[in-house]
Image: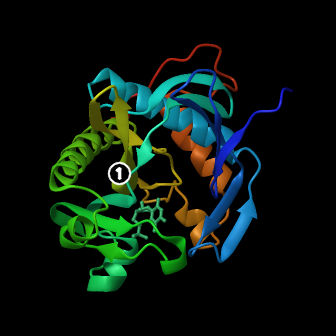
Amino acid sequence: MSRRRRVYEGKAKVLYEGPEPGTLIQHFKDDTTANNNQKHATIEGKGVLNNRISEFIFSKLNDIGVPTHFIRSINMREQLIREVEIIPCEVVVRNVAAGSLSKRLGIEEGTQLPRSIIEFYYKNDELGDPMVSEEHITAFGWATPQEIDDMMALALRVNDFLAGLFLGIGIRLVDFKVEFGRLYEGDMVRVVLADEISPDSCRLWDTRTNDKLDKDRFRHDMGGLIEAYQEVARRLGILFENEPKRRGPTLVK
Ligand code: TMP
């Protein structure tokens, strides 16, 4: 295999130089971490599943006019993306209380929230990605007020789309995290969805059983992570094994 220039290596992904200027190859690894890197494991097959699930979601979002960095699939673990300047804020959207929200505010896990809530976290491993307000983001220049508005509007569109997509296949979208980047096109710059959307970055509960079909299985040592991710892919209709044709999501009634 020809040697490619590695541009960036994160916990679960590697970015390589792409075939054309302004493009990158996003490679999904099998590595997984939790608790701000204190816990680490390699789970065979996770990268392939996340790549498939994320490319499926990103291409559907492109189809409905949510701008993303995704261009096309390359292989089982890799996708071609547009190079963007990542805005150093993670955007979390919550529909149901869980995780750090439940802990911070003492709200029982599983409680439906009165409305979808958006939170921002400053991307900084050394600080453990602290939660920040819009005031912090603008005061420290991490994003402009207009970019914050764009991120919030896009995050809510992603939430509506994903909640409906998952509900149709018997999965409750509890919460998720997304990242955005600045895409420079000539004199223009616009905010587009970047990174990934997969069971690593969402909380997904089976609507009937409340089974967790996401990374909480790893965070809480529950086991069965690959089986859970496979189940999400299978319900989305994008698992290759035993599926000669890709059919798309199968509605669960
Ligand atoms: P939290 O409840 O731990 O704050 O997580 C909220 C959502 O964001 C959950 O779906 C998991 C996701 N998330 C990430 O993808 N990466 C992270 O580093 C963190 C802290 C959360």
Figure label count? 1
Residue occupying image coordinates x 32% and y 68% = 110
Nearest the viewer among 215 and 242 is 215
Secondary structure under tag 1 reads: strand
Q: Is residue 207 visible?
A: no
When the figure is inspected, residue 243 is found, relative to residue 34, above or below; the finding is: above
Q: Provide residue 190's location: percent of width, then percent of height.
A: 28, 36
Residue occupying image coordinates x 29% and y 35% = 189
When the figure is inspected, residue 131 is found, relative to residue 17, above or below; the finding is: below
When the figure is inspected, residue 104 is found, relative to residue 132, above or below; the finding is: below
In this view, the residue farthest toward the front is 187
- Image quarter where ligand 1 lies: bottom left
User: Where on the picture, by quarter, is residue 139?
Assistant: bottom left
Looking at the rendered image, the quarter that the N terminus falls into is top right
Nearest the viewer among 132 and 87 is 87
Q: According to the image, label 1 marks what residue?
A: 172
